[in-house]
Image (cartoon, rainbow, N blue to C red):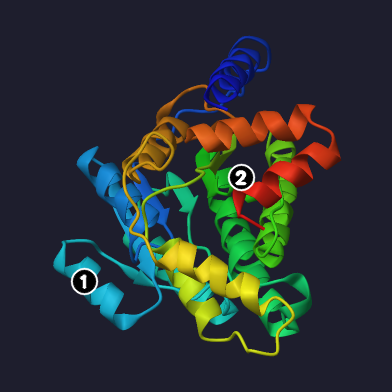
Amino acid sequence: MFLMSYFGAKLISIRQRKFYPMRASKIHSKTVLVTGCSSGIGESIANCLREGGWDVFPTARSESDLQRLHSKGFDALHMDLRDSVSIDDCVSSLMRKSPLGIGAIVNNAGIAIPGAVEDLSRDDLRTQFEVNVFGLQELTNKLLPTFRGQGWGRIVNISSIYGILTAPMVGGYCASKYALEALSNAQRMELSNSGIALSLVEPGPILSSFRKNAYESLRNKICIGDHFYNDYKKTLKRKLGCSQRNTMFTLDPKYVAEKVIHALTSDRPKRRYLVTHPARAGSLMARILPDFAIDYFMKKSVNF
């Protein structure tokens, strides 16, 4: 898998760099809005950008997270992507605080509700789409008039390898990321020749509380009568019973931040950034393997 991911990544990188470059106008303001900064990837992106001289406006939903970000010196903004009024208020605050223009937005906020598809309620599906797709796109579209007026701007959407591959027990999350990939690909093409660049980042396994929080929510809702009860118990034992560690397959969030910085600063940002070896292997696998082989590997990946 390592060799497949390495050579696949090299092939994809060469193809993107030499044959299909994405040009973008230089941005003239280092003001950036980063969503979902309560922990993990979002917080790391905000820290790394600030260290690079950016004027970072991180967002969070809970008051405790906002206070913690304020204590670190950030001008944090409240935003709940499930609420259009909250999005409007956040954009208005950002505009007031950024008289010299807005350089970029990094859409990192996301949510996952694990479970077999047949056990996901309409509310479970709606919540994931409201945060991962609808709210994200509404926020981006509200900033686009500013970017178009400036003639420059960068959009970075933090997606997932689950936006091109599907695994059991995370079908709702995968569906939302597939939708995000489709919207991002379409909007990237629509923005060509506008000076505005849109990039996708597919991290793969990263050290953060995201997966732990997701599976904690699963533990709180499973019932003994569920058809997949034993599978849920086995999954919870595996996901919550061992601590994450930094390995060649599970990386620190700073590696995601490095890709984001390139997407924001390069005059030829990539359309898609793959961060970890599993993400690179998965991207190649989705392109070359038949469906039955993908099914086999994805089921094995979650011990299903």
Q: Tell me where residue 247 sits by quadrant.
A: top left
Residue 7 sits in quarter: top right
N-terminal of the pair, mark 2 or mark 1, is 1
Q: Which mark is residue 132?
A: none
Q: Tell me how far mark 2 sits from mark 1, CA to CA.
A: 30 Å
In front: 291, or 76? 291
Element type at mark 1: helix
Q: Is residue 195 visible?
A: no
Q: In the picture, residue 81 is in which quadrant?
A: bottom right
Q: Residue 161: percent from the left, percent from the top?
A: 61, 45
Crowding at mark 2 (Cα within 10 Å: few <14, some 14-19, many 20+): many
Q: Which residue is mark 1?
A: 68
Residue 273 percent across, percent down from the top left: 54, 33
Q: Residue at x 44, y 38 (%)?
A: 249
Residue at the far top in the pictured view: 18
Q: Residue at x 66, y 67 (%)?
A: 134
Say how many tags the image has.
Answer: 2
| Above or below, 160 relative to 126 | above
Locate residue 295, reporting x and y percent: 77, 46
Instruction: Looking at the picture, tell me which residue is in the foreground, 176 or 135.
Output: 176
The N terminus sits in image quarter: top right
